[in-house]
Image: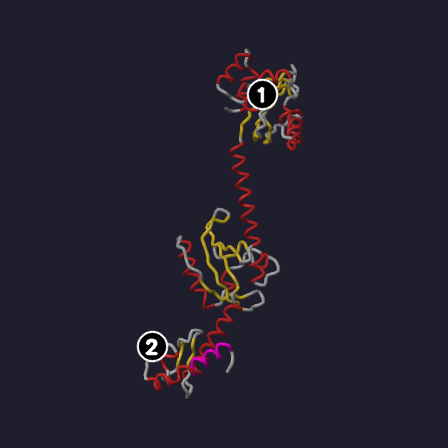
Amino acid sequence: MNINYIANLLGNHKDIEFTKKIIDSVSASIWYRDLEEGALWVSSENAKLYGYTQADFESNSELWKDFVFSEDMDIVQNHIKTLLSGKSSDIEYRIIRSDGAMRWIQENTHITKNDQGKVILITGIVFDITDRKMTTIHLAESEERYRHLIELSPHAIFVHQEERFVYANPEALKMLGVNHENELLGKRIQEIMVPEDIDRLQVRLKRLLRGETLPFYEYKLKRLDDRVIDVDCNSVRIPFNGKPAVMVVGKDITEKRKLYNQLKDNKQRYKSLIEFNANSVYSLDVNGYFTDCNHILEQMSGYSTEEILKMHILDAVNPEDKEQVKKRFELAKKGTP
């Protein structure tokens, strides 16, 4: 029901009581205040919304002060001042019903002036917007929690849209050696990539924007100081400001990659020492089973590497030497040469 139509109906209809009955019959939540007569009227639906009766409002024109939420009192009082000054005003505020329930109210108003420009009638239509408001509040709270999780994440998180950075959390700025987000936002993502990874990036972006789910992938990225780092990351398509975008979650694994490469090199050197040694070389686990051997041991024992790796040390020695070998093995486990 349109507030202007209601205001004209109340202001111009000759039989005001008949108009009130019409409003009550359609369960419209409406009130009006006649400033010339000093009268306040609320519809039965409006009174019910606040948890009172029409008689309660008729007997106490200041009843609204009892149910308006204390923290919203200034909002309502300023609303009234605005209306009395001749300006329109629509507001949202909270009330505490007579049964103790809290509700959110939206109030749209219309003012009627006489020929001299003086406000003589104020009409209001009231809506219970609690469900809508609480949904909005819960959504805002959820977004706030999500924002905090992103901001406090130990992983670098950034968003790029149309291949340009539009967001980066503190850890992402730190990882890329950026002091302030303005140094990164707006840059093309290719600017932090090493040339050999750009083509692979383009392929993955196309797949992501088609809705595919991709596994983690390692990239080499250039920090602001031009130092190249290894980053293990994954990406997912998200909406950002109403448009498709890509959110990237990554972790600097430069040190981890360096240690892995060192371990790989050490393992290769160890393998070379065993394989090219002129003597038989082998390793055992703590239970005495072979874990590695070189080809010299193959030649000496007559067994293949596959066969040796299934054997216990005592299976490979002469029966008369087993006791001595067993003692030496126990000493070796204790660290005694």
Magenta highlight range: 324-334
Q: Residues within 10 Å of mark 2 (few under 14, many from 20)?
A: few
- Camera-side residue: 296 or 41? 296
Instruction: Tell me if mark 1 has few (under 14), some (14-19) or many (20+) residues whose alpha carbon lies within 10 angstroms of its own.
Output: some
Q: Amino acid at mark 2?
A: Glu
* Residue pointed to by mark 1: 52
Mark 2 and 1 residues: CB-CB less than 8 Å, in contact?
no
Up-down relation of residue 308 to residue 202 (above or below)? below
Farthest residue in the bottom direction? 278
**Residue plotted at (66% across, 19% down):** 116
The answer to whether residue 107 is magenta is: no
Q: Amino acid at mark 1?
A: Tyr
Position in image of residue 326 (x %, y %): 43, 80
On whether residue 331 falls in the magenta region, the answer is: yes
Indicate the position of residue 211 as horizontal and vertical percent values.
Answer: 40, 52
Residue for point 63% across, 24% down: 64
- The local secondary structure at tag 1 comes to loop
Q: Residue at x 57, y 18 (%)?
A: 53
Q: Secondary structure at mark 2?
A: helix
Viewer-side residue, 1 vs 270: 270
Asked if residue 314 is positioned above or below residue 143 in the image, the reply reads below
Estimate the x, y position of residue 240 in percent, counting from the top left: 50, 49
Report the side of 124 relative to 207 (left or right).
Answer: right
User: Horizontal placement of 103 versus 81: left or right?
Assistant: left
Image quadrant in which you'd find residue 181: bottom right
Residue of label 2: 306
Q: Main secondary structure of the magenta part?
A: helix
State how many labels appear.
2
